[in-house]
Amino acid sequence: MSEIRVGTSAFTAAGWQDAFYPAGMKPADYLTYYASRFDTVEVDSTFYGAPSAATVTGWAHKTPDNFTFALKVPQSITHQKVLVDCDDEFKSFVSTAELLGAKLGPMLFQFGYFNRSAFTSRAQFLARLKPFLRKLPTGHRFALEIRNKHWLTPAFLKLLREHNVAYALTDQSWMPGPNEIFEKADPITANFTYIRWLGDRKGIEQVTKVWNRIVVDRTAAMTSWVDVCMKIQKRGVSIYAYFNNHFAGFGPASVQLFRDMCIKNGLDIPAPVAPPVIERTLFD
C-alpha cells in the first residue's frame, strides 16, 4: 500500500510556543519534539537560502529514522535566475540535501505567477523547463508548483510525467480546487504526489498573524481533499502533504483534523508516533 505522510510547512511559527510546543521548551528542541508528533515536514527556510551542511546534519540527528524532510529549492534558482545559469548552485543544494540520507524526501520547485513580463507564453516557459528537467539527478524525488492556472495544460503535465516530476497540487485561492483539477486532466505525473494546503494568505492575515488557533472553518475544503487522497492512494501513489498556517490559522491543528477525517473515511494513514497535544484549536 502506498504511504501518506502529512505534516506542516516549517516546524515553527509565531504562536506555536505553548499552543503546540510545551511552555518553556528551547527552540533547539523544537524539531525533535515535532518529529515525535509528525513524520514529515516541509522546510520553508531553504526557499530563502540554501542551508549549510551543519544545519542539514543537525536536522538529521534530531529526528528518528522514519522521518522525512521535503525541501524547497532556493528562490535564487526558481525566481531570480529562473533555471538559467544555476547548474552549479543547484548541484550544491542537492549535494547538501543528500546529507539527510534516507530522510530526504521530495525537493520542491516553487515558481511564481509568471506573467508576460517574465515569459511571453506558456510555450516559452516549457522551452526553458524542458532542458532543466533532463538534467535532474536520478535517485531523487522532485515536485514542481506553478501559480498561474492558465499554465496548467496537458503539455505541461506531459512534460512533468516524462521526467517523473510530481505536479504540486495546491489549495490556493487563485488555483483550481482538487475536484476541478481531476475533472480537467490527470494531475498525477509521478510515482508520488505532493500536496500543499496554502489557503488565502491575504484573507487570513486580516484575521490573525499569530498562528496558534484555527480561525477559519475549512472543513468543506478538507473533505474534498480527503476524497482526492483516497483516489490517489487507490492508484498506489504515495502522498506527501503539508499544511501551511494560512490554510486555517494553525498548521498542527489542521494536520490533526485531516488525520481524523482520513481515518473516519477509511483512508490508510499511519498514526503519529505520539498524539499531538494541541491547545486552542477551535475557530472563532
Image (cartoon, helix red, strand yellow):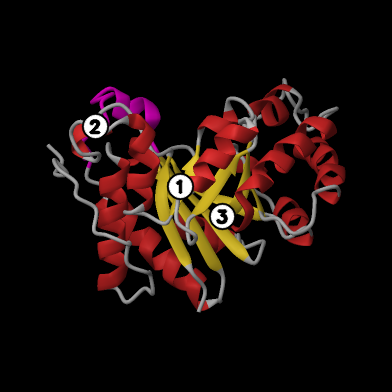
Disc 1 secondary structure class? strand
Q: Nearer the viewer, mark 1 or mark 3?
A: 3
Q: Is residue 2 left or right of residue 94?
A: left
For the residue marked with disc 2, what is the amino acid?
Gln
Residue at coordinates 43% horizontally, 38% vertically from top-left? Answer: 10
Count of labels shown? 3
CA gap, disc 2 to disc 1?
A: 17 Å
Instruction: Check whether the beta carbons of the residues at disc 2 and disc 3 lie within 8 A of each other.
Output: no
Toward the viewer: 253 or 148? 253
For the residue marked with disc 3, what is the amino acid?
Lys
Q: Is residue 2 left or right of residue 161?
A: left
Picture coordinates of residue 218, whole percent (x, y) = 27, 48
Picture coordinates of residue 33, whole percent (x, y) = 32, 46
Can the viewer see residue 175 in this picture?
A: no
For the residue marked with disc 1, what is the amino acid?
Val
Toward the viewer: 114 or 165? 165
Residue at coordinates 32% horizontally, 77% vertically from top-left? Answer: 266
Which of the two labelled residues, at mark 1 and mark 3, occupies the earlier sequence position?
1
CA gap, disc 1 to disc 3?
A: 11 Å
Per the image, the residue denoted by label 3 is: 103
Per the image, the residue denoted by label 1 is: 41
Disc 3 secondary structure class? helix
User: Is 213 part of what is drawn in magenta?
Assistant: yes
Which of the two labelled residues, at mark 2 and mark 3, occupies the earlier sequence position?
2
Per the image, the residue denoted by label 2 is: 17
Magenta stretch: give its range.
Answer: 199-216
Can the viewer see residue 133 in this picture?
A: yes
Which of the two labelled residues, at mark 2 and mark 1, occupies the earlier sequence position?
2
